[in-house]
Image (cartoon, grey):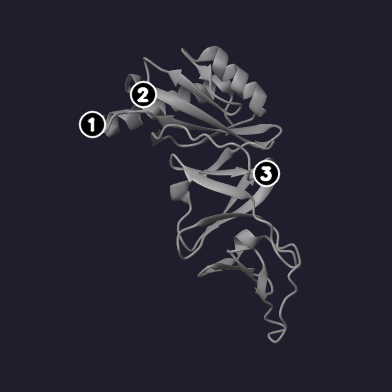
């Protein structure tokens, strides 16, 4: 897959923290540098393969927990090896970042930085739901069952739900965790004067209903 897909909500990724996420079956380490810029890296240190999501953020660098190798957020290059403090690490020791963007309250990744990116209209982000269905199967089921649903792209669609979510339209976004698991996000397009308490209550009821209907994972 070369297009863009949401992999996490922006507010899940606080500065100074590292979060593990899945993209196309790959484990990623998501982190923010001191300027707040987000990075998506393969979740393995090139030294011993330890999960980078277990490491720490130090300013604009990510530091592996195992042997303390330091990698720059600017280009992924290793800048320090504590066991050899006088050695300048070879330029080949680096981590290749995935293309990343933030839009509509979500973090998006792609295997192709040149792929066209069309962000959905901003909205109130729902809690994500995992489903034990492949992405094409869940996409087809949603398009066939939701009133007024129409595909916008391969991974997102627009629907009008007159009896849920206060009647506001919603954009549904799908993320392929792997071949058999897909995560569903929603962006509710309510006006600023909408009753948020009622909206969140409606969201809970609607999400419970689609969990039952489409077999969300426990």
Position above or below: 29 against 192: below
Nearer mark to the viewer, of 2 and 1: 1
Whole-angstrom CA distance, mark 2 to mark 1, is: 14 Å
Q: Measuring 49% from the left and 57% from the top, which residue is drawn there?
A: 37
Q: Residue at the bottom extreme? A: 86
Quadrant location of the N terminus in the rendered image: top right
Camera-side residue: 66 or 10? 10
Q: In the rendered image, which quarter contains the C terminus?
A: top right
The residue under label 1 is: 193
Query: In the rendered view, does 55 fall on the left or right side of 38?
Result: right
State the separation of the CA atoms marked 3 and 2. 34 Å
Q: In the rendered image, which quarter is residue 79 located in?
A: bottom right
Q: Residues within 10 Å of mark 3 (few under 14, many from 20)?
A: some
**Residue 204 seen in the figure:** yes
The x, y position of residue 118, in whole percent, is 52, 34
Whole-percent x, y for residue 3 in the image: 63, 36
Residue at mark 2: 165
Name the one closer to the observer, 71 or 91. 91
Q: Residues within 10 Å of mark 2 (few under 14, many from 20)?
A: many
Callout 1 secondary element: loop
Q: Which mark is residue 111?
A: 3
**Would residue 69 be seen by someone viewing this image from the given angle?**
no
Residue for point 61% across, 62% down: 54
Q: Position of residue 106 (x, y in %)?
A: 48, 42
């Amino acid at each position: 897959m070369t297009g863009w897909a949401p992999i996490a909500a922006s507010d899940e990724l606080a500065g100074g923290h590292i979060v593990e996420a899945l993209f196309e079956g790959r484990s990623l380490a998501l982190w923010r540098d001191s300027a707040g810029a987000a990075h998506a890296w393969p979740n393995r240190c090139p030294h011993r393969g330890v999960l980078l999501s277990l490491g720490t953020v130090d300013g604009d660098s990510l530091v592996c927990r195992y042997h303390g190798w330091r990698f720059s957020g600017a280009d992924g290059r290793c800048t320090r090896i504590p066991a050899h403090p006088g050695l300048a690490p070879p330029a080949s020791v680096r981590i290749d970042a995935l293309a990343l963007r933030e839009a509509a309250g979500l973090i998006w990744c792609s295997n192709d930085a040149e792929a066209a990116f069309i962000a959905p209209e901003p909205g109130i982000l729902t809690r994500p739901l995992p489903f034990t269905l492949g992405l094409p199967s869940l996409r087809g089921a949603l398009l066939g069952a939701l009133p007024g649903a129409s595909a916008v792209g391969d991974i997102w669609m627009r629907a009008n739900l007159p009896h849920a979510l206060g009647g506001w339209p919603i954009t549904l976004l799908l993320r392929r965790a792997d071949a058999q698991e897909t995560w569903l996000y929603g962006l509710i397009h309510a006006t600023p004067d909408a009753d948020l308490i009622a909206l969140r209550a409606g969201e809970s009821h609607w999400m419970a209903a689609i969990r039952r209907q489409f077999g969300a994972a426990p």
